[in-house]
Amino acid sequence: MSAEIKYVTTPHPVTGVVNSKLGIWLFIATEVMLFGGLFSAYIILRVGSASWPKADEILNVPLATINTMVLIFSSVTMVMAWASLMLKSLKKFRLYMGLTILLACVFLVIKFFEYSGKFHHGYYPSTNNFFAVYFTLTGLHGLHILGGILVNAYFFIVAGREWKNRPKMFTNRIEGAGLYWHFVDLVWIFLFPAIYLV
Amino acid sequence: MSTHNTEDMLKHIKIYIVIFFALAVLTVVTVWASYIHVSEWLHVTIAMSIASVKGGLVVAYFMHLISEKKLIYAVLILTAFFFIFMLIVTMTASETMGPLVPDFW
C-alpha cells in the first residue's frame, strides 16, 4: 500500500490556496507564538528588574547594523530567486539563490565574531538576565538562519532536476522557502532594535 | 500566483528594489533615532514603530500579503489576536508585579 502524499500544484477548491502555501503560513503562525513567548519573557525580565544595562554600550551595534543590512539584502535576493522562476530563468534563479545562501552565511560569520567577542570578555548566558535574553533570542534566530541555509542549499542543488521535471511544484516550493526566509528577516527587524538599541 | 505574466513580474521586481531601499533607509533611521536623548519609553516606542513599518513592508511585498487569499488573512488575524493577547497579559502582569529581584544586572 502506498502512503505517498500527492503534491498538488493547483489551489485547493475549498481554501483557494495551494496546500503547501497554507502549510507554510500555519507554520509561520506557530513561529510567531514561539518568538512571541520569548519576547514576553524579555518584557517580564526587563520591566521586573530594578536596573537594566545600556545595550549599545555592551553590544556591538555597528556589527548588528551590518547584519541587518545583510539580511534585508538576502530577503530581496530570495524574492528575486522566486521571480526568476516565474520569468522561467533557471540561470537567474541560481544566481539569486546562490547570493541568498551566501548572504545568510555572511550573517552567521558576523554573528560568530559577535559571540566570540562576548565570550572573550567573559559574557555568557549565565552571566545575567540581560545576556540570557540576548543569547536566547539571537541564538534561536541564528538557528533559524541555519535552517534556512539548509533548505535553500537543498533547493539550489536539486534545481536543475526539479526545474526540468516539475517546474510548477519547484516554483511553489521556492515561494514557500521564501515565505519562511522573509519571516526570519522579519524577526530580526524586531530583534535588532529591541535588543541592541533600546 | 499562476496568473502572473512577464510584464506583471517585471513591475513586481521594480517594487522589490524600491522596498529594499526603503528598508535600508529605515534601518539607518532606527540606529540614528537610538541616539536621540528622550525617555526610555519613548525610545522603545520610536524603535518599535519604525520596526513595525519595516516589518509591514516585508510582509506586504516580499511575502505578497498585499494580494493574498482570504484564508491566509484569517489565519494571520487569529495569530495576531493570540500574539497581542499574550503581550497584553505580559505587560499587565509586569506592571502589577513590580521589581521581581532588587537588581537583575
Image (cartoon, grey):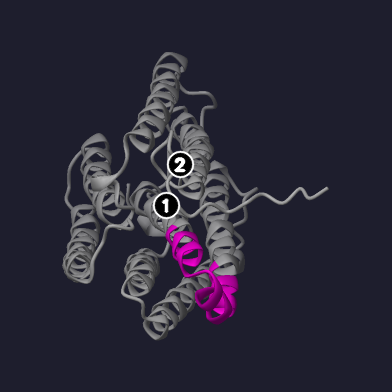
Furthest-top residue in this view: B96
Which residue lies at the image location 76% right of the left edge and 48% below the top edge?
A3
Q: Quadrant of the N terminus of chain B?
A: bottom left
Above or below, B82 relative to B12: above
In the image, the segment drawn in magenta is A152-175
Q: Position of residue A40 (x, y in %)?
A: 47, 32
Q: Specify the subunit that label 2 lies on.
A: A
Under circle 2, the secondary element is: loop
Which residue lies at the image location 57% right of the left edge and 74% below the top edge?
A153
Task: Answer with left or right where residue A160 lies relative to residue B87.
Answer: right
Q: Specify the subunit that label 1 lies on.
A: A
**Residue under pointer 1:** A183
Q: Position of residue B70 (x, y in %)?
A: 32, 34
Graded by Cα atoms within 10 Å as few (under 14), some (14 to 19) or many (20 or more), the crowding at tag 1 reads: many
Tell me the distance, in whole angstroms, between the alpha carbons under discs 1 and 2.
24 Å
Is residue A62 located in the magenta-colored stretch of the structure? no
Above or below, A145 relative to B42: below
Q: Amino acid at mark 1?
A: Phe
Above or below, A89 relative to A192: below
Task: Answer with left or right where residue A102 lies relative to residue A182.
Answer: right
Q: Position of residue A166 (x, y in %)?
A: 53, 69
Q: Position of residue A47 (x, y in %)?
A: 42, 29
**Residue under pointer 2:** A12
The rendered magenta stretch, by its main secondary structure, is classed as helix
Q: Nearer the viewer, residue A18 or A128?
A: A18
Q: Nearer the viewer, residue A74 or A27?
A: A27
Observer able to see residue A65: no
